[in-house]
Amino acid sequence: MSLDGFSVDLGGTKTAVAQIENGVVTRRLQQPTDAGAALADQLTAIETLLAEAGYRHGEPLGVAVAGRVDREGNWHAVNKTTLSAISAAPLGAELAARFGARTKAVNDAAAAAWAEAQLGAGQGTFNFAYLTVSTGIGGGLVLGGRLIESANGLAGHVGFVSSPLGETICGSGRFGTVESVAGGRGIAAAANLPDARAVFESGAHDAIIDRSARAVATLIADLTTILGLDRVAIGGSIGLAPGYLARVATHLSQEPDLFQPALVAATLGHDSGLIGALLMAQQAGREAPFR
Ligand code: ADP
């Protein structure tokens, strides 16, 4: 397929800029995100990286971000612990002013879901969900071939569904979310270690990792009840950590058959958000954007 252009992944910890040729990331430049910086300064940093990567003003540019992007292109934190400084930031308008009209800002997990549905683990499905288990839990839903979006940009934020295992208030303000139990921040807090990677590497916190996998399995069964999912793909640094997917599968197998969709690993890895954002930028403005 012909998918050529540039994308940005603006995450809480790192900012990546990529050149994409024929649907494949051929060049990637990356630097730590200055999370406390104002939007204009973050965009200036992105502009510099893009210039270095060979981007020229006016070319299609997809921008994937954590948090929600509403229909007007305004960017908002959902979990205030992850993105404390972001509140109704006019990302869409700023991108258009700096880089031209062929830009689109989208939620990173929604972009990843769309990329997986088109080019990765979701191909050939009717109702597909992508879940990323990383610092938080992100998601995207592709139903009947359409990415589910909403005016407020919240659709697909499945990490904020409540979990029967939840015990704490999450940065979203909701009590006991799947993200608070299963996300990297929740895992690290439960083990009293600096981050989830340290929890995995310690080898001493099996119960905490298993609890995360169990919460994700319940979420998958719940989503399947509502949406009739036929396949779910798991991504993210924790989701793809050795042994994690098998744990989710074990817990999911405890559910009645009807509530068990096919469970697979995401196949586009860390590139899915970048690829999906460019796909969406290219498709933006067309009459039927998600067909
Ligand atoms: P991103 O959210 O962009 O994927 P990172 O890859 O840095 O960012 O990691 C996000 C979360 O995944 C953090 O909670 C981190 O501790 C955890 N993590 C990263 N690498 C691993 C790993 N190899 N095994 C388990 N957890 C990991």
Image (cartoon, rainbow, N blue to C red):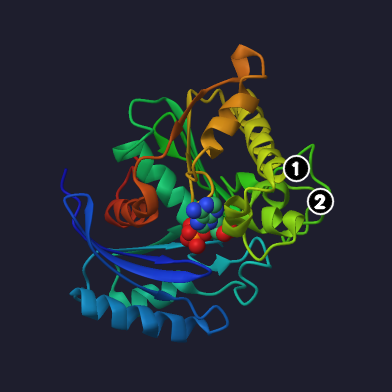
Is the C-beta separation of discs 1 and 2 under 8 Å? yes
Q: Is residue 100 above or below residue 192?
A: below
Q: SS at mark 2?
A: loop
The quadrant holding residue 25 is bottom left
Of mark 1 and mark 2, the one earlier in the sequence is: 1
Front position in the image: 169 or 236: 236
Q: SS at mark 1?
A: loop
> Does the closest atom of ligand 1 sit within 8 Å of the Cβ of label 2?
no
* Position in image of residue 97 (x %, y %): 35, 79
Mark 2: few/some/many CA within 10 Å (<14, 14-19, 20+): some
Mark 1: few/some/many CA within 10 Å (<14, 14-19, 20+): some
Which mark, by number, is residue 162? 1
Residues at marks 1 and 2, CA–CA distance in whole angstroms: 7 Å
Quarter of the C terminus within the rendering: top left
Q: Which amino acid does label 2 sit on?
A: Phe
Instruction: Write the residue at 22% across / 49% down.
Output: 23
Q: Which amino acid does label 1 sit on?
A: Ser
Which mark, by number, is residue 62? none
Look at the image and tell me whether residue 239 can be seen.
Answer: yes
* Position in image of residue 104 (x %, y %): 37, 62
Q: In this view, does 83 lie above or below 127?
A: below
Question: Mark 2 highlights which residue?
Answer: 175
Asked if residue 193 lies left or right of residue 7, the reply is right
Asked if residue 7 lies left or right of residue 256, the reply is left
Q: In this view, does 146 lie above or below 32?
A: above
The quadrant holding residue 119 is top left
Q: In this view, does 85 lie above or below 244?
A: below
Residue projecting furthest to the right: 167
Quarter of the N terminus within the rendering: top left
Instruction: Write the residue at 79% across / 37% down.
Output: 164
Look at the image and tell me whether residue 152 can be seen.
Answer: no
